[in-house]
Amino acid sequence: MPEHRVGTQEEFDAALEGLRVKEKELTHRGDDNTREREELPWVEVEKDYEFQTVDGKASLADLFDGRSQLMIYHFMFGPDWNAGCPVCSSIADSLAPQAPHLGARDVTLLLSSRGPVEKLQGYKERMGWDLPWVSAATDFHGDLGFYSTEEELRPFLESGKIPPTVTQNAEMCGTDVAGYVAEGPGLSVYALDDGTVYRTYVTTSRGLEAAMAFYQLLDRVPKGRNESATEPLWIRRHDEYQTG
């Protein structure tokens, strides 16, 4: 544990009270952001995307499963990978228990990847998730910026500055660096109104932290996230952590 200032109970209470004021301000700013999301203009999804499910082919409208709102997590699992991205897996760990609650509020939650359905289902069983998982054509992920071609990635791949986390995660997925960074994580949201599908929200990168509950908890312990940009990321699939 790093050295840290030790104070009195009175000093702790005063500092904590000041922090709570800032936390409440942050909560109010979050409420403002939520209102802005709700006011975003919807855009009609005109392309006929096709998905493979355990029950056969499906359209984007089919994925709503009788509800009017659809939330899709774009899970990094390439067609030739042996396993899903460990970071995406940690996100799915947080998402899976939320599906029944979202369903009660007219929202269908599912995962989408470019990998074949058979691989996705096998990995899903290993992880113990009870979430629908569809295999999507490349353009569905690519149109949102969640898939990149090797040509698009060439400057990064030839830069000589590949972060250690990328190399590590590529090995954990059974692919190379180019194959790993071709995939991208993201969240996209849709509404179905009178038979027409509209895209209503898209986010990626730190916008996904809402689905990474463990980070919010780590932000409240003494060592925090304790991550380094020069070292591989600590995150593993939940059945790969060593205990003891």
Image (cartoon, rainbow, N blue to C red):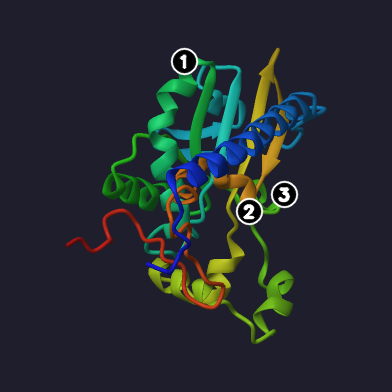
Q: Amino acid at mark 1?
A: Ala
- Which sits in the foreground, 179 or 94? 94
Mark positioned earlier in the residue sequence (2 or 3): 3
- Badge 2 crowding class, 10 Å Cα cut-off, few under 14, some 14 to 19, many 20 or more, is few
- Which sits in the foreground, 205 or 142? 205
Specify the quadrant that holds the C terminus: bottom left
Please name the residue that numbered disc 2 is placed on: 205
- Badge 3 crowding class, 10 Å Cα cut-off, few under 14, some 14 to 19, many 20 or more, is few
SS type, badge 3:
loop
Relative to residue 208, is residue 2 drawn left or right?
Answer: left
The quadrant where residue 36 appears: top right
Relative to residue 6, is residue 26 drawn left or right?
Answer: right
Instruction: Tell which tag, 1 or 3, sits nearer the viewer.
Output: 1
Please name the residue that numbered disc 1 is placed on: 104
Find residue 189 and report its horizontal and vertical position in percent: 64, 33
227 above or below 46? below
Query: Is residue 204 among what the camera can see?
Result: yes
Q: Amino acid at mark 2?
A: Ser
Find residue 175 and report its horizontal and vertical position in percent: 46, 72
The quadrant where residue 210 appears: top right
Find residue 8 and report its horizontal and vertical position in percent: 44, 49
- Which sits in the foreground, 134 or 227? 227
The residue located at (56%, 46%) in the rendering is: 209
Please name the residue that numbered disc 3 is placed on: 143
Residue furthest out toward the right: 41
